[in-house]
């Protein structure tokens, strides 16, 4: 059979190869305004240009004190302090606290010199404009955020390869970084091959099916943070595919060719890649189900992936390998979140192939349940129902109903 | 104290109010091209316009047979069949199978009439151009996807309120739906108040701090799928805040005012909202930590939220209530994924307040561990480290180290 003509490598070998290719690829960087930087991947290490906070701040509304002055303060026997000043927000405070004195400081306000602790306003009572009673002692440093407590000047606060979160934006803002150096969004082209495939606006004759992989893959690419520069539908014809691939190469970092990745008479992907100068086929066939007839090739150092035309296969191959390449060329190595869930049916590995089974998650009491989505091959409604997939290693062979398994979510959540 | 002047309602009451307000808000819809529809929220139910598949298809490369013809087929005693035709991809097949005959059909190809099962090519042997041997029997319907197996014409395949996934795009594409009716992206404005707050490009004097909440909130809004139309920094001044709020109302669905939501002398948010005609304060104070001094108001039926200026408080209030409102006005009711993780430290609820503790997730062997992020109030680096938060109900009071807790991720993953 066709499948037997190529030697399938293991999933781990495929990971190693795709990671190596990614590490060799040089991605450009660009500066983006901070407001547009969410979910982009940082291209350099960022070090604090100033201390954070830049001055000793109060973390409460209250009174700055010397701890000795309130050491014995209690409800029953409060201490009296003289109010010498009230700090305003944003003010540079020049007052220096002395024994027996206190200063009102709002949350976030600068502390007078010699302040040792902040008594919360709740534990004080105003006697008159110049006097308060304090009914609770405070520890050295209590309710104070000292200069550099959050970040010291020179400390690295964001490292290369990090996907920018909302709170990273906050950190950048607090450092006055208005533009962030990130990797340029990797650009994909998608070529869908197949004599029976038609575009979304074409009249559909019986026997024809509409092209769907470019939409599904395009959605995954956008969710990852990539760009799609053109989707093309091509007949199963060597010259047509070659012409489209040539047109895509100049403008893309990664080209995906959906369909034609096996070794049948009409499977041209491999031959087309090999017909280019400076081309190479690194992988043809991975011991995985679905997704066995997968090709990793290169033309002029750019990745060309031959994906199986079957939507579920294209999904798995993309999610495992293309995603890894996409993240690695941007130096992103963050962990992917998976969810522990209880299987509600048996699942089996295909003999000799690491098997990825789509599942639908649902909440049962306090647990997640994973329903294996079985169905006839190629059912789009099954894919649309899928929350994620579980991995059945070759050696494992099966997981029985009731097993707690790791569900990898289709839309990644990185930590 | 200030906090005691307003009556804090429970988190559940706050949810009920924000949900009611959201259900009363009318969001417009718009048509977007399918390639731009990922992660948008569908505004109508979609029913299948055709059967999927539209014809009986083979799910394998192989031979169409009548089951009786191969009933006794085995390796030891194969059956002989006459090959009368080879189906091409995309072809409308008019051949009708008869007893003793077979037709080659590629994966996805149309089946001849009277086909009962598909024998995989692996279980056949070609004798000559017109004859094959079959060494395995097939069941009725084996390796066949019948018309409508995936979706029947008229069946609902996407319902209102669903966030569009990559595979939903595939379903839309297979139905030839090139434009999708989705809710318009809700528009936010953010007003940051505070005398000590300066913009990212301003010269920083000692005592001043840079505005960060608009960046962090803006990032969360974009990740949710909203738009931010303008961020403004305003001094703690009634007239200035009122003027900015008035300018924001016309162009926004939701206005967030960061800071000034408590009841101190310089907390103007409530009074500013109440100074408008057709305004209302629904909530002022929620029994939650952090985030107690939170305001839900309305002006002309639009939501105005007074968020605490403290970044962690603003985060929690936004993530719980504003997010709920945002999703509900788009009829989205999907479940939020949480992760079970083992606490690596004790956490305590604030007395009388449902408490949200930020945690950092990490993998330990096969488990997720949740490290409570303690630190001085207002530390941005803590927030940037946070993966999510855990919820400590008032009645619970505490969770001790080693407890398996639910971690709600900061960047939601919906099922």
Image (cartoon, coloured by chain):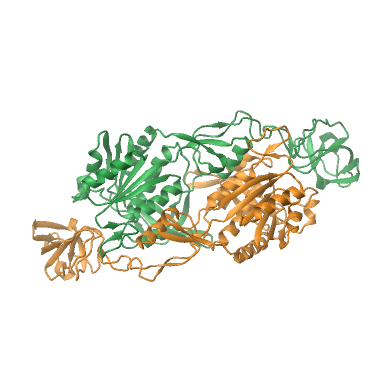
Chain colours: A orange, B green
Q: Residue at x 50, y 56 (%)?
A: A414
Q: Is residue A273 above or below residue A310?
A: below
State the image coordinates of residue A150 (x, y, percent, origin top left). Answer: 34, 65
Q: Nearer the viewer, residue B381 or A116?
A: B381
Residue A40 seen from this side: yes
Residue A91 location, x and y as percent? 21, 62
Q: Answer whether residue A345 is visible to the viewer in this image.
A: no
User: In this orientation, which residue lies closer to the viewer: A372 or B278?
Assistant: B278
- Using the image, determine if residue B163 lies above or below residue A389: above
Name which quarter of the figure residue B153 lies in: top right
Considering every residue shown, the one lying at the far top of the view is B154
Q: Is residue A161 above or below residue A236?
A: below
Q: Quadrant of residue B61?
A: top right
Q: Is residue B235 left or right of residue A364?
A: left
Foreground residue among B342 and A165 = A165
Q: Position of residue A115 (x, y in %)?
A: 20, 68
The residue lying at 60 percent from left, 65 percent from top is: A23
Seen at 26% across and 66% down, the residue is A56
Residue found at x 26% / y 65%: B206
């Amino acid at each position: 059979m066709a499948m037997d003509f190529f030697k399938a490598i293991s999933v781990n070998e495929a990971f190693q190869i795709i990671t190596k290719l990614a590490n060799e690829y040089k991605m450009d960087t660009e500066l983006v305004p901070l407001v547009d930087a969410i979910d982009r991947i940082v291209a350099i290490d960022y070090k604090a240009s100033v201390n954070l906070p830049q001055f000793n701040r109060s973390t409460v509304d209250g009174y700055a004190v010397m701890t000795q002055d309130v050491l014995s303060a209690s409800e029953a026997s409060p201490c009296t302090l003289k109010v010498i000043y009230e700090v305003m927000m944003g003010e540079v405070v020049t007052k220096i606290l002395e024994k027996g004195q206190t200063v009102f400081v709002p949350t976030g306000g600068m502390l007078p010199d010699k302040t040792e602790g902040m008594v919360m306003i709740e534990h004080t009572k105003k006697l008159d404009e110049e006097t308060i009673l304090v009914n609770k002692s405070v520890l050295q440093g209590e309710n104070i955020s000292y200069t550099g407590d959050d970040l010291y000047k020179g400390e690295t606060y964001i490292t290369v390869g990090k996907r920018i979160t909302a709170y990273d934006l906050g950190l950048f803002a607090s450092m006055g970084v208005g533009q962030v150096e990130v990797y340029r969004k990797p650009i994909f082209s998608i070529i869908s091959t197949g004599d029976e495939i038609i575009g979304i606006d074409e009249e559909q004759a019986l026997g024809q099916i509409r092209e769907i992989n470019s939409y599904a893959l395009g959605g995954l690419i956008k969710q990852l943070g990539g760009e799609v520069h053109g989707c093309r539908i091509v007949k199963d014809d060597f010259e047509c595919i070659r012409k489209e691939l040539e047109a895509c190469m100049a403008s893309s970092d990664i080209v995906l060719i959906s369909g034609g990745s096996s070794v049948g008479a009409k499977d041209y992907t491999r031959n087309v890649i090999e017909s280019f100068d400076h081309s190479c086929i690194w992988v043809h066939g991975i011991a995985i189900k679905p997704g066995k007839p997968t090709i990793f090739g290169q033309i002029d150092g750019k990745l060309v992936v031959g994906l199986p035309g079957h939507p579920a296969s294209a999904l798995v191959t993309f999610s495992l390998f293309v995603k890894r390449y996409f993240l690695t060329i941007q130096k992103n190595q963050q962990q992917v979140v998976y969810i522990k869930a209880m299987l509600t049916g048996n699942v089996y590995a295909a003999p000799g192939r690491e098997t990825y089974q789509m599942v639908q998650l649902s909440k049962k009491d306090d647990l997640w349940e994973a329903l294996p989505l079985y169905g006839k091959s190629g059912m789009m409604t099954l894919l649309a129902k899928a929350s994620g997939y579980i991995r059945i290693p070759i050696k494992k062979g099966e997981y029985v109903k009731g097993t707690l398994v790791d569900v990898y979510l289709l839309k990644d959540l990185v930590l």
